[in-house]
Image (spheres, rainbow, N blue to C red):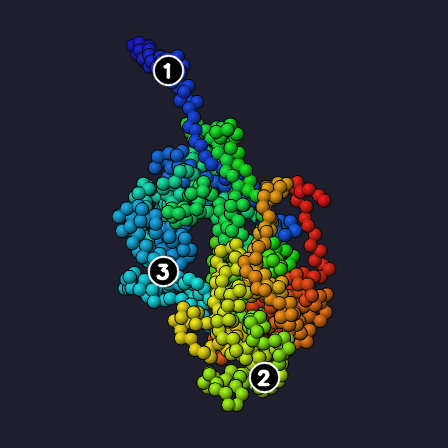
């Protein structure tokens, strides 16, 4: 009985096993015989995507070929939306990628202006205007439900962008609208007491921006719902995930490319983990990034960055209309932006094939209509007019000498031009390191510095020229016949008419600085003496004879009140005192203002670069050239010249040789006999110099110190302007000027030309 049962069980088990084997062989037969072609096609199926490959930017060198900015090869992580899969797979992939980022300390791109951790609040105070605009525009395009969820954020962004220095804090029991209303009242004043101006409202150095307590939870919830984020995903992980998806949405909405750069400059350890994870749609590519070979000229060189949302979607978008992709790296400031068309290379086009698992299996370059492979072509190299060693000397002198001038010093600038308007050096103090743009903590620290290091005072700071303006008044009077080179005018301490003549300025009798400071009088002085001694009475007399129109005409011919033409953006125009300027300021013009205008006071304001170019125009005989930074453009291998700058005058003043020598004599006398002579006596060349002191703010505030000079005296090669905010007397700037002249003409400045690859030796 037992044996029979065992036999039955054995047969039963054997039958089951036979059935399984039969099923197995049936499936195997189906795979290998019946449907072999279909399965082979599925196994070898590939998805082909065509993509644009950005080319390396050209290098930036100084006038002697010293490389200032070049490229380095880096690895970057890109996300391809087309191969990330459906929502669930996409989200799982991105969460794993974010996990690896945290493990390896990799920072990824996330500009969503919402805090990283709960409770989620808006962080508009930590974002720039372009980020806020991108956020606002995307919210507007995503429909009513998104706009409603983001209403508080949109209101904050609008307040920040319209008021610049808005300080918004939602207090307990207070509404957001009330907070925004308070922000709207917090306008930044255009007329700061230190004489520094900005054309558009922005955050003043003294002000801090605070936006806190405005909940972003409604928008986070809407975004999680829209992107189908699993409710089981934690708040912090969910915020990180929607931040990445927000970036993808910014770059892929109505844009031809489906890729975006998730993280740049990642290391091998990170790459290894990503490869091991086998994340579909996540690619590691090699590309180039800017590397800086100098610690100087930060304001001049500028930076590169991604194309902003509003730049791309603008109706007249330069980038969209000139063959760019939204992921491209472009010049954002300085010469990187000014010479974008030269530096930008020609992008390549390649086809990337991925298998069914999203793995890249092949990459090939795509031929154009002529059969030529579209391999990326690097951009041209741009040689600038600046001398790196001179730039270093200028910045070093400012950093060493400016802080100790007065206890009220705020900032400074110095500009050195050649005789055709080429910029040899241009410095703004305090300065910064260009690496801050890749370090958000460092950038925030610099941007919040009350001395405003990011502000380019050389082209944006507006200052009264003070007595450095007197040469314009002198040239105008000489050229128009209101005085002669030998005429002497009596300084009596205060400006007045001879007895019996009707005085047109009422009770206004402005005094010479010498009378106010020492109770003294210069006595009889000619033009040269008056420039050397900076005698106010002499120039009051000339202005009284000429009137304001002639002074304004000559100031304009020397380039004041108009842009110099320098290629970088942000240059201020300034103004020249006169009836038109007063009307534009909503002020009344009084006849007595003529006298202050003649000595560079009143409403006359100019930039340091305008001052330097005015001196160039004066001492080169009257030719005003556009200020420029471009010297030469060469091909990527330096073998051919693409373009060479040719200087053509914007204006010419036909200054007679006698009149020019008369004015130059006074400038030379100040440098050799005047208050600054001690600084120049040991230099290898003779210098011409003029000081200026411009009063600003209250009676207890230090004046702005202004200084201009040129060298050599007999055959000028360079002109220099220096301005120190709240620096006191312009005389104190002689030491900085002497440092610069010594650096330019000294034996240590060999100015050797660096021979670059494929450059023909001669």
Q: Say whether marks 2 and 1 touch (CB < 8 Å).
A: no
Discs 1/3, front: 3
Residue 245 appears in the rendering: no
The number of callouts visible is: 3
Q: Earlier in the sequence, mark 3 or mark 2?
A: 3
Q: Nearer the viewer, residue 575 or 9?
A: 575
Q: Earlier in the sequence, mark 2 or mark 1?
A: 1
Q: Residue at x 40, y 75 (%)?
A: 588
Inter-mark Cα distance, 2 to 1 = 111 Å
Q: Is residue 684 left or right of residue 388?
A: right
Closer to the N terminus: mark 1 or mark 3?
Answer: 1
For marks 3 and 2, give the one nearer the viewer.
2
Tell me, for residue 162, which label it has, or none. Answer: 3
Horizontal and vertical percent position of residue 186:
36, 67
* SS state under label 1: loop
**Image coordinates for residue 240, horizontal then vertical, percent:** 39, 46
Describe residue 109's horizontal placement relative to residue 339 as left or right: left
Q: Mark 2 falls on what kind of element?
A: strand
User: Residue tagged by mark 1?
Assistant: 35
Spatial CA distance of label 1 from label 3 is: 67 Å
Q: Position of residue 257 (x, y in %)?
A: 41, 38
Q: Position of residue 362 (x, y in %)?
A: 49, 28
Residue 638 versus residue 620 in the image, above or below: above
The reply to whether residue 543 is visible in this rendering is yes
From the image, which quarter does the N terminus lie in?
Answer: top left
Question: Extreme front residue here?
Answer: 481
Residue position marked by numbered label 2 in the rendering: 491
Task: For label 1, count other residues whose C-alpha is less than 10 Å away and answer few (under 14), some (14-19) or many (20+).
Answer: few
Q: Nearer the viewer, mark 2 or mark 1?
A: 2
- In what element is the residue under mark 3? helix
The residue under the point 59% across, 41% down is 636
Is residue 605 found left or right of 155 in the rendered image?
Answer: right
């Amino acid at each position: 009985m037992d044996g029979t049962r065992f036999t039955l069980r054995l047969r039963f088990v054997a039958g089951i096993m036979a059935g399984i084997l039969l099923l197995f062989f049936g499936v195997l037969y189906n795979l290998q015989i019946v449907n072999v072609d279909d399965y082979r096609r599925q196994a070898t199926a590939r998805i082909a995507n065509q993509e644009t490959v950005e080319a390396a930017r050209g290098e930036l060198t100084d006038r002697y070929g010293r490389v200032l900015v070049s490229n380095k090869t880096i690895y970057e992580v890109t996300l391809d939306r087309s191969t990330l899969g459906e929502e669930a797979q996409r989200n799982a992939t991105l969460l794993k990628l974010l996990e690896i980022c945290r493990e390896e300390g990799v920072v990824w791109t996330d500009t969503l202006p919402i805090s990283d951790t709960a409770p989620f609040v808006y962080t508009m105070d930590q974002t720039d205007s372009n980020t806020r605009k991108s956020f606002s525009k995307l919210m507007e395009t995503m429909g009513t439900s998104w706009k409603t969820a983001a209403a508080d954020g949109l209101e904050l962004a609008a307040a920040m962008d319209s008021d610049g220095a808005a300080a918004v804090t939602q207090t307990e029991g207070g509404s957001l609208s009330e907070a925004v209303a308070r922000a709207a009242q917090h306008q930044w004043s255009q007329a700061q007491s230190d004489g520094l101006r900005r054309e558009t409202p922005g955050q003043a150095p003294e002000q801090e921006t605070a936006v806190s307590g405005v909940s972003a939870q409604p928008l986070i919830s809407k975004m999680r719902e829209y992107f189908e984020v699993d409710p089981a995903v934690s708040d912090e992980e969910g915020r990180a995930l929607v931040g990445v998806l927000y970036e993808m949405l910014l770059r892929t909405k109505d844009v031809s490319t489906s890729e975006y750069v998730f993280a740049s400059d990642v290391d091998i350890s990170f790459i290894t983990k990503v490869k091991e994870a086998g994340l579909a749609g996540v690619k590691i590519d090699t590309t180039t990034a800017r590397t800086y070979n100098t610690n100087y000229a930060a304001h001049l060189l500028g930076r590169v960055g991604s194309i902003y949302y509003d730049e791309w979607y603008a109706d007249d978008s330069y980038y969209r209309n000139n063959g760019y992709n939204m992921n491209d790296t472009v010049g954002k400031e300085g010469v990187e932006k000014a010479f974008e068309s030269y530096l930008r290379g020609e992008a390549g086009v390649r086809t990337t094939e991925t298998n069914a698992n999203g793995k890249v299996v092949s990459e090939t370059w795509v031929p154009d209509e002529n059969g030529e492979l579209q391999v990326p072509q690097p951009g041209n190299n741009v040689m600038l007019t600046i001398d790196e060693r001179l730039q270093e000397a200028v910045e070093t002198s400012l950093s060493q000498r400016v802080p100790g001038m007065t206890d009220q010093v705020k900032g400074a600038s110095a500009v050195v031009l050649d005789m055709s308007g080429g910029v040899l050096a241009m410095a703004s103090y305090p300065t910064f390191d260009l690496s801050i743009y890749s370090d958000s903590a460092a950038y925030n620290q610099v941007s919040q510095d009350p001395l405003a290091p990011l502000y380019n005072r050389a082209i944006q700071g507006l200052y009264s020229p003070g007595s450095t303006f007197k040469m314009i008044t002198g040239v105008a009077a000489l050229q128009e016949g209101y005085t002669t080179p030998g005429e002497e005018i009596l300084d009596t301490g205060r400006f007045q008419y001879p007895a019996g003549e009707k005085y047109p300025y009422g009770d206004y009798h402005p005094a010479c600085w010498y009378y106010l400071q020492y109770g003294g009088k210069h006595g009889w002085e000619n033009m040269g003496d008056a420039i050397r001694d900076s005698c106010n009475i002499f120039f009051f007399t000339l202005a009284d004879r000429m009137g304001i129109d002639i002074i304004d005409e000559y100031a304009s011919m020397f380039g004041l009140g108009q842009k110099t033409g320098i290629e970088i953006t942000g240059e201020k125009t300034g103004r020249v005192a006169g009836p038109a300027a007063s009307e534009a300021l909503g002020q009344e013009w009084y006849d007595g203002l003529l006298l202050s205008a003649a000595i560079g006071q009143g409403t006359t304001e100019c930039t340091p670069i305008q001052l330097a170019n005015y001196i160039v125009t004066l001492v080169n005989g009257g030719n005003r050239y556009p200020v420029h930074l471009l010297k030469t453009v060469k091909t990527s291998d330096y073998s051919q010249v693409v373009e060479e700058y040719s200087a053509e005058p914007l204006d010419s003043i036909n200054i007679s040789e006698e009149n020019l020598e008369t004015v130059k004599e006074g400038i030379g006398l100040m440098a050799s006999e005047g208050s600054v002579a001690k600084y120049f006596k040991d230099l290898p060349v003779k210098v011409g110099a003029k000081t200026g002191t411009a009063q600003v703010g209250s009676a207890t505030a230090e004046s702005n110190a202004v200084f201009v000079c040129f060298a050599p005296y007999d055959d000028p090669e360079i002109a220099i302007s220096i301005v120190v905010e709240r620096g006191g007397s312009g005389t104190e700037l002689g030491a900085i000027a002497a440092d610069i002249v010594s650096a330019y003409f000294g034996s240590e400045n060999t100015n050797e030309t660096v021979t670059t690859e494929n450059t023909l030796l001669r």
